[in-house]
Amino acid sequence: MNYFALFNLTPSFVIDTTALAASYQQLQKLTHPDKFATASERDKLIALQKNAQVNDGYQVLKRPLSRAEHMLELRGVELQHEQKTMQDGTFLMQQMEWREQLDDAQHAVDPLIALEELDDEVAGNSKALIDELGTLLEQTNDAANESAANLVRKLKFLFKLRHEIELKEDALSDF
Amino acid sequence: MAYSEKVIDHYENPRNVGGFDKNDPSIATGMVGAPACGDVMKLQLKIGANGIIEDAKFKTYGCGSAIASSSLVTEWVKGKSIDDAVKISNTDIAEELALPPVKIHCSILAEDAIKAAVADYKKKNQ
């Protein structure tokens, strides 16, 4: 399933999010089950499947990381997150240090500020990787695709970490 | 999802948490990560002159299954030669901990950590 085609967008890492949202709303309306209340069972089923595709596609395209993964999938690049262990020592050491910092943050004088500083640092790194990913995805050769896949894998660690920072911030602010 | 008793035991009482000085030539360090869930695992082995693993420590940031898998391998590798340690497979780990299919990648991570540590040791001492 090519979600870019579904939403009538040119496959690209940089997308017009307004156009995506508009296209989503239109398709959502066209395939909404309510519209098929009196239709045949077969048409109902088709509309329901189409509606689910529209929702799935929107979720995939609106976030940069899943959008990049989808582009790579369309190019036949297997990401194999489950099987492929990351072995980049320098990168992983940094991940370890950040996670230690996250653990230590609660003992800081002001834990929320410590968390915010850590998040700023990780966010800055994520942004740099996303920019790099955008440049790589403009090319379509195998080497660029493989480098892009590697960046997607790295970004997964950073996004997970930012999510954990967020959870910790919520836990601290919630009393 | 329900964790098996063995996973819970290792998760609540992890064995051999910590680390050694990675610059020490007798220490093998394996750093691995799982992109699927963002888990990061560091496994360190203290290796004697005879190639026997004398001690092992780990530090893992991840889910209960990832922590249990690394805790288990630190127990398993002690007393083994490095050649035997790399024979520990993810299926052995998954079977011992009764990991469900969605958590198999945690055992793969632990297996790869042993291999990465041994590769690090061989590189250091070639």
Image (tube, coloured by chain):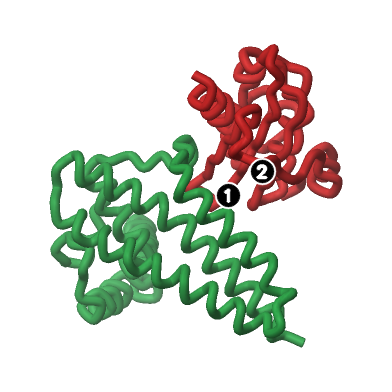
Chain colours: A green, B red
Q: Are marks 1 and 2 in contact (CB under 8 Å)?
A: yes
Q: Where on the picture, by quarter, is residue A33?
A: bottom left
Residue at 70% in and 43% down:
B19
Residue at 24% in and 81% down:
A18
- Report the amino acid beneath label 2: Ala
Label 1 or label 2, whichever comes before in sequence order = 1
Residue A23 location (% of width, % of height): 23, 75
A17 left or right of A158?
Answer: left
Residue at 46% in and 72% down:
A121
**Which chain does tag 1 point to?**
B
Q: Where on the picture, by quarter, is residue A38?
A: bottom left
Neighbours of disc 1 within 10 Å: few (<14), some (14-19), many (20+): many
Taking depth in this image into account, of A51 and A10 the one nearest to the observer is: A10
Neighbours of disc 2 within 10 Å: few (<14), some (14-19), many (20+): many
Residue at 56% in and 26% down:
B121
Residue A38 visible, this angle? no
Above-or-below relation of B73 to A127: above
Q: Secondary structure at mark 2?
A: helix
Residue B73 location (% of width, % of height): 72, 30
- Report the amino acid beneath label 1: Asp
The residues bearing labels 1 and 2 have C-alpha atoms spaced at a distance of 7 Å
Q: Where on the picture, by quarter, is residue B5?
A: top right
**Which chain does tag 2 point to?**
B
Q: Which residue is mark 2?
A: B66
